[in-house]
């Protein structure tokens, strides 16, 4: 005799929230999302990543030797900061030849080998294009400087002084001092937004545009999948050279006035250049990432382009300006970038700013907080860019004495500005001498934390920051809600716990982050969002919620899969 049993499945079906179902038609199919929306990017500062030849400086062969590590971590694309020939005044951001590799890092053959090995592992390579300036040793500048009538004179910004010993205007370099340097031989000043060894290119000259565009083609043909564009907002200057207004009284770490960079940054002409670069990138299916420091999301929007024809991934640095672990501040930031006209790009650290480990760490629960931050930027709607060492909880270790500083701005601005050495210390691979980074003398001292925070030790410890990163990255790669889902903030009034839903075609994930140093209880509005419960996917000491109630320890993080009880089904 046939028995018909009506049963309510109590095991989570974990699919199709009611509200979520309605979204199906409006969301893109997974395969329609471009590769750079699915990818996890990883920034490598090549000097500091892995040294293959014992000279104390990392190199391309070193990077190649770590590709398996990166693959295993869950990295899809590596962004290598400039590895082109350079006098290294700004550690590579002063390029003297855009179509070669600095001998310190290897050869073009090493690059090709790295590209081949990366491709075998489906890891893409992104290079760093320094578009605003070259090195003063670049052949274009050497020629430009050689005479007022040289072929390349107009490739840079040359002007007469205002009067004897007076630069053309009041602009100051962001790295200290006047932004103008007198060339006594030709009697004119050239403009440099950064160091004097980094003269600004004249992007109003079509020849400059053509040459730089060709550089991108040259590398695309060699297999790179895109560029991170350096300092895009400084490409153009007011041709009339109006003085910048003084923003407020006082002087900065270099003793310069606080200027509002009204006439030498963020000029609208940059968009035409970005559109040109994007056209070429599109021919190669490549991505353009921007170093886009913006005041607000409105400014950020400009970089996507009015017709989505500029940068695919302008970095949201506003996120890094949240200077304390505050649920309310992060919620506000995320909400803002969610209104952006394009796909968000999240970074929490890079080679120019204090690492997130120190920005948000309280000195006692830093590893726990590092895990919390990992959940945050790896589960948001957008592309994350990890900075090397974040995944093992690397600490910023600035030099203690001015005589040890390598970064010129640190020498110039000491002690107010200690430079950026602290966030560029060598990657910590193991407990051996120099953390396994080099057999020689490292160009910067290894952080003393390498004994506890290194890849080898953390690979063996199931509770390490590294293992946690691996878990979250694995989930991110396989969970479509995390990859493509909508972002909805929940419990928005909670000042301590940041929580949100990610929902894609009925599949849902809830993320709950206790950003305070005491345990917190929250009630998740699951029903209101069409779900009945949440199943623990990844958490730091948090049990799955019961009846929507969740208890989080201090700095606890929870990622749960949202479930909906199936409608009664007939089982026969
Ligand atoms: C931004 C880079 O990230 C920084 O390291 C560099 O010093 C400046 N641009 C100048 O290229």
Image (tube, rainbow, N blue to C red):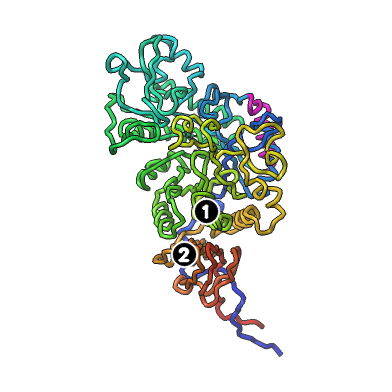
Give me the residue at 35% from left, 28% from top: 172
Is residue 103 rendered to the left or right of residue 333? right
Residues under numbered marks 2 and 1 in contact, where contact means CB atoms less than 8 Å apart? no
Quarter placement of the N terminus: bottom right
Q: Secondary structure at mark 2?
A: strand
Could you tell me residue 325's position as x and y percent?
46, 56
Up-down: is 61 above or below 202? Answer: below
Could you tell me residue 404's position as x and y percent?
55, 32
The answer to which of 150 and 428 lies nearer the viewer is 428
Where is residue 124, by image quadrant? top right
Q: Earlier in the sequence, mark 2 or mark 1?
A: 1
Q: Secondary structure at mark 1?
A: loop
Give me the residue at 36% from left, 33% from top: 265
Is residue 220 rendered to the left or right of residue 143? right
Instruction: Name the residue at the bottom extreme.
Output: 1
Q: Magenta residues, as a range? A: 103-121
Write down the residue under mark 1: 361
Up-down: is 279 above or below 449? Answer: above
């Amino acid at each position: 005799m046939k028995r018909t049993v009506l049963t309510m499945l109590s095991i989570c079906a974990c699919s199709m929230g009611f509200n979520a179902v309605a979204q199906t038609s409006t969301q893109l199919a997974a395969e329609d999302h471009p590769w750079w929306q699915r990818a996890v990017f990883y920034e490598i500062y090549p000097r500091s990543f892995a040294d293959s030849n014992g000279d104390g400086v990392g190199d391309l062969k070193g990077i190649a030797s770590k590709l398996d590590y990166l693959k295993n971590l869950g990295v899809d694309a590596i962004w290598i900061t400039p590895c082109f020939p350079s006098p290294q005044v700004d550690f590579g951001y002063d390029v003297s030849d855009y179509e070669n590799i600095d001998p310190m890092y290897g050869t073009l053959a090493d690059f090709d080998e790295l590209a081949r090995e990366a491709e075998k592992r489906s890891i893409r390579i992104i290079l760093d294009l320094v578009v605003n300036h070259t090195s003063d040793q670049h052949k274009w500048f050497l020629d430009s400087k050689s005479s007022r009538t040289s072929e390349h004179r107009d490739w840079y910004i040359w002007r007469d002084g205002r009067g004897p010993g007076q630069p053309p205007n009041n602009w100051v370099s962001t790295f200290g001092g006047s932004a103008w340097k007198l060339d006594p031989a030709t009697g004119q000043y050239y403009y440099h937004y950064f160091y004097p060894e980094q003269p600004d290119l004249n992007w109003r000259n079509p020849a400059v545009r053509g040459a730089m565009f060709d550089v991108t083609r040259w590398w695309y043909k060699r297999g790179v999948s895109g560029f991170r564009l350096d300092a895009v907002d400084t490409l153009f200057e007011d041709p009339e050279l109006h003085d910048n207004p003084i923003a407020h009284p006082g002087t900065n770490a270099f003793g310069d006035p606080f200027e509002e960079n009204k006439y030498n940054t963020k000029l609208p002409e940059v968009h035409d250049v970005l559109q040109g670069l994007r056209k070429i990138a599109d021919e190669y299916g490549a991505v353009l990432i921007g170093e886009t420091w913006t005041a607000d999301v409105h400014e950020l929007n400009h970089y996507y382009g009015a017709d989505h024809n500029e940068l695919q991934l302008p970095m949201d640095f506003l996120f890094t300006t949240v200077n304390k672990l505050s649920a309310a501040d992060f919620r506000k930031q995320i909400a803002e970038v969610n209104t952006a006209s394009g796909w968000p790009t999240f970074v929490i650290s890079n080679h120019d700013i204090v690492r997130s480990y120190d920005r948000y760490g309280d000195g006692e629960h830093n590893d726990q907080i590092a895990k919390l931050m990992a959940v945050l930027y790896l589960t948001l709607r957008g592309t994350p860019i990890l900075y090397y060492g974040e995944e093992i909880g690397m600490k910023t270790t600035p030099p203690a004495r001015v005589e040890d500083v390598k970064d010129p701005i640190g020498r110039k601005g000491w002690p107010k500005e200690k430079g950026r050495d602290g966030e560029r210390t060598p990657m910590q691979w193991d407990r051996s001498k120099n953390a396994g980074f080099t057999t020689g003398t490292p160009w910067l001292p290894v952080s003393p934390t390498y004994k506890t925070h290194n890849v080898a030790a953390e690979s063996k410890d199931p509770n390490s920051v590294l293992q946690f990163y691996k878990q979250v990255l694995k989930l991110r790669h396989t969970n479509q809600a995390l990859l493509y889902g909508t972002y909805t903030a929940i419990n928005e009034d909670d000042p301590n716990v940041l929580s949100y839903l990610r929902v894609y075609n009925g599949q849902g994930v809830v993320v709950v982050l206790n950003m305070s140093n005491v345990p917190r209880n929250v009630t998740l509005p699951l029903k209101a969002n069409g779900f009945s419960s949440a199943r623990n996917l990844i958490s730091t000491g948090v049990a799955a919620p019961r009846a929507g109630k969740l208890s989080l320890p201090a700095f606890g993080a929870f990622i749960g899969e949202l479930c909906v009880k199936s409608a009664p089904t007939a089982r026969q």
